[in-house]
Image (cartoon, rainbow, N blue to C red):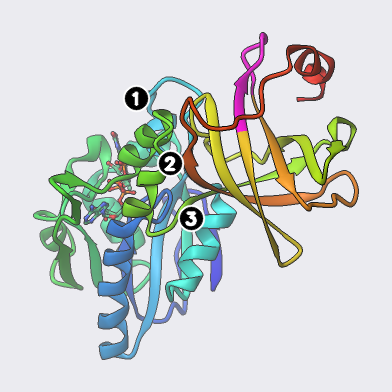
Amino acid sequence: METVYLTHNQNQVFLDIEPCVMVLGFFDGVHIGHQCVIHTAKKIAEEKNVELAAITFFPHPKEILNHVEKPFRYITPMSDKEETLAGLGIDKLYVIEFNRELAALPPKSFIEHYVIGLNAVHVVAGFDFTYGNKGEGNMDTIGLDGNGRFQVTKVQKVTCGDQKISSTLIRETLGKGEVEKIPDYLGDFYETQGEILIDTIIQEKGKVRAYLTTKPGYTLPSIGWYSIEVFFLHQIFAGTSSVQLLDNGVVVNEIELEGFKPKDNNTLLKIKWLNRIDECENKNPVNKNRLREFSTSF
Ligand SMILES: Cc1cc2nc3c(=O)[nH]c(=O)nc-3n(C[C@H](O)[C@H](O)[C@H](O)COP(=O)(O)O)c2cc1C
Ligand SMILES: Nc1ncnc2c1ncn2[C@@H]1O[C@H](COP(=O)(O)OP(=O)(O)OP(=O)(O)O)[C@@H](O)[C@H]1O
């Protein structure tokens, strides 16, 4: 998959672009609803024998338009989104910088400049996709804005029970620590990536305990204890993790793993959050002195 980063410039002209089926949206987390949009588009691209492309944005419009408290919490960083989209068959990913200039662009201009400009012959998006200034363009207006230059497929709402599967629902679920519900929305357990802080390692009775710094662009689940799986050098380790709040307001993550031998600093781990451990089970107790000792490392 090729990724093309674009910053809005009215005079920019795209040349020699292959015809494509284009999916549109932010796609944070690439959840089951997003996957349905992409699968639908992939089938059409195969039938039409053209490339499959996606237009997404960065940062999230809500972050720029102050619709939410800062910092805005992403489910995954852009690098994970790229990897997942490539795995789903996207050939070309256009990442348009979302800034105030782009936000002010009228819906029809967005369609003309980007969707037609990037040679979409067919557009696929979900039932609630919006675009253009004040989000006034939607799946009922997109055909008119396109002046018949492309076909449109609107994907119906994908739900879990009676809830729309959405990035917002996933962020809220992580905020409640209900990580065991995440596979119903994402299609898999939630994963984060973090680096071990080597100075914080304690090894006892075949177990390793250490603090991690989570890579930017992920959202740790709420304060509490969780059972986890850790992926490191093609091996899987079972363990637990606590998410703790430091006095300075920083949220940290301490893991305890069996049979794990960390190599050196910058050891990057993938953590799969399986379920919240409730009160009666074994938890690694918070050692306040240890937290204080290392709090400057985070
Ligand atoms: C050109 C353009 C201008 C936009 N302007 C606004 C805006 O003024 N206010 C707003 O809330 N969202 C605005 N958006 C964001 C869209 O409403 C929407 O969040 C974005 O296209 C991503 O779609 P999705 O949330 O359905 O994935 C704009 C989007 C585009 C592409
Ligand atoms: N549950 C769903 N069913 C069908 N289409 C969906 C669903 N969720 C999102 N989409 C579509 O996927 C694309 C990307 O959507 P978007 O990134 O806004 O997801 P979202 O989950 O609605 O995000 P948020 O909760 O942050 O608003 C859009 O075309 C959108 O309409």
Looking at the image, residue 163 lies above or below residue 234: above
Query: What is the distance, in whole Å, between disc 3 and disc 2 at their CAs?
Result: 29 Å
| Ligand 1 is within 8 Å of the C-beta of the residue at disc 1 | yes
Residue at figure coordinates x 59%, y 32% from the top left: 282
Q: Nearer the viewer, residue 15 or 187?
A: 187
Residue numbers of the magenta segment:
242-251
Residue at figure coordinates x 16%, y 69% from the top left: 152
| Ligand 1 is within 8 Å of the C-beta of the residue at disc 3 | no
Residue at figure coordinates x 13%, y 71% from the top left: 148
Looking at the image, residue 94 lies above or below residue 161: below
Is 126 placed left or right of 207 in the picture? Answer: left
Of labels 3 and 2, earlier in sequence is 3
Is 278 placed left or right of 39 in the picture? Answer: right
User: Disc 2 marks which amino acid?
Assistant: Val
Q: Give the SS element for disc 3.
A: strand
Query: Residue at label 2?
Result: 179
Query: Residue at label 1?
Result: 67
**Residue 76 image position (x, y, % from top left):** 51, 47
Query: Residue at label 3?
Result: 95
Q: Is residue 36 visible?
A: yes
Mark 1, other Cα within 10 Å: few <14 / some 14–19 / many ≥20: few
Mark 3, other Cα within 10 Å: few <14 / some 14–19 / many ≥20: many
Q: Nearer the viewer, residue 201 or 70?
A: 201
Q: Give the SS element for disc 1.
A: loop
User: Disc 3 marks which amino acid?
Assistant: Val
**Residue 188 image position (x, y, % from top left):** 43, 58
